[in-house]
Amino acid sequence: MMPIGDDPHPRGGIPLVNLAVIAANLAVFFLLQLPDEAFTMAYSAIPHEILTGDDLIGPVPVQLPDGTTETLPHADGPDPLYLTLFTSMFMHGGFAHLFGNMLFLYIFGDNVERAFGPLVYSAFYLVTGVIASLAHVLTNAGSVIPSLGASGAISGVLAGYLVLFPSNKVKVLVFFRFVPMTYTVPAMVMIGLWALLQFVNGFGAIVATEQTSGVAYMAHIGGFVAGVLFAFLLRPFADRGSERYAKTVY
C-alpha cells in the first residue's frame, strides 16, 4: 500500500519544519551524494566505526551472503564519528529510496508537526532518528556496511501519527496485477500493517541479517518504538484538533 493522501489537520497552516526536512534530504542527495560517492561513504553510519571509534579509510573487503567478496571504498568520516548517527538521517541510497521516504514524510509529517508545534516536532524527529540509527548499530555491531536514510526518523513520525490520529482516513494506492486501485483506510490499519511488516522482517533478520535484505529493519523498529513512547508522553500537550473531519482533502 502506498499512501497518497490523508485527513488534514483542522488548524491548517504551513508545516515549515516538515517541508524544510524534505528540502534538506533532497539537497543532500542531489548536491552532495550524486556528485561524490566518497561523501556517502564518509557520512553514512557504519556500526563498526560507531562502536570502536575506528574510522575506516580506503578499500574494505566485505563478504556477501552468497559467499562472494566486494570491496567498499570507505572515506574519511567526520570527527567525532558519532556525528554520522545524525548525518546519515539525511542521506539515501537511490532515487526510489529517496522518493518513498519523502512521500511518507510529506503525507504524515505535517499533521504531527501541527500537533506538536515546530520546535517539539524538530526534536521529536531528530531524537527518534538517532535512536533508530543506534538500534541498527547495536544489532549489527561488527558490520562495516554503511547505513543511511531517513526511514528511522520517519518510522518515529508514523508512530506519532498513529498515537495522535488513529482514526484519520488515509487514501492508499494498491496495485492488483499492475492495475492501480485506490482505497481509504483508517490510519491504524495503514500504519499498523506497515509496523507489523517491520517487526516480522526485523525479528527474521536476527537469523538473516539486514545486510541480506539491504533494509535496516531494526532501525525502523527502533524509531517506531521510540516514536510511540514519546508520542504518548507528549499527547496531553498536543493539539490534535478533531480526529474526524467533515471534509477530507487529498
Image (tube, helix red, strand yellow):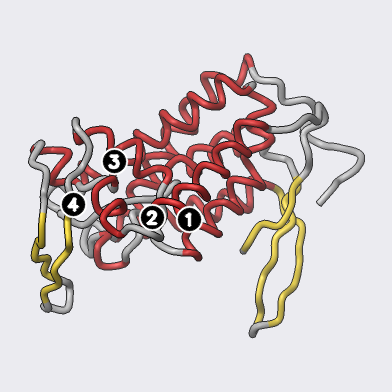
Q: What element carries label 3?
A: helix
Side (left or right) of 45 relative to 183: left
Please tell me which residue is depicted at 40% across the width and 51% down the height of the picture.
Answer: 32
Q: Where is residue 69 in the image (x, y as percent from the top left)?
A: 11, 74
Residue occupied by mark 2: 33
- Numbered circle sitting on residue 30: 1
Question: Tag 4 or tag 2, which sits nearer the N-term?
Answer: 2
Callout in the foreground (3, 1): 1
Q: Position of residue 215 (x, y in %)?
A: 35, 60
Residues at marks 4 and 3, CA–CA distance in whole angstroms = 23 Å
Residues at marks 3 and 1, CA–CA distance in whole angstroms = 27 Å
Residue 121, quarter of the rendered image: top right
Residue occupied by mark 4: 75
- Numbered circle sitting on residue 135: 3
The amino acid type of the residue labelled 2 equals Gln
Q: Quadrant of the N terminus?
A: bottom right
The amino acid type of the residue labelled 4 equals Ala
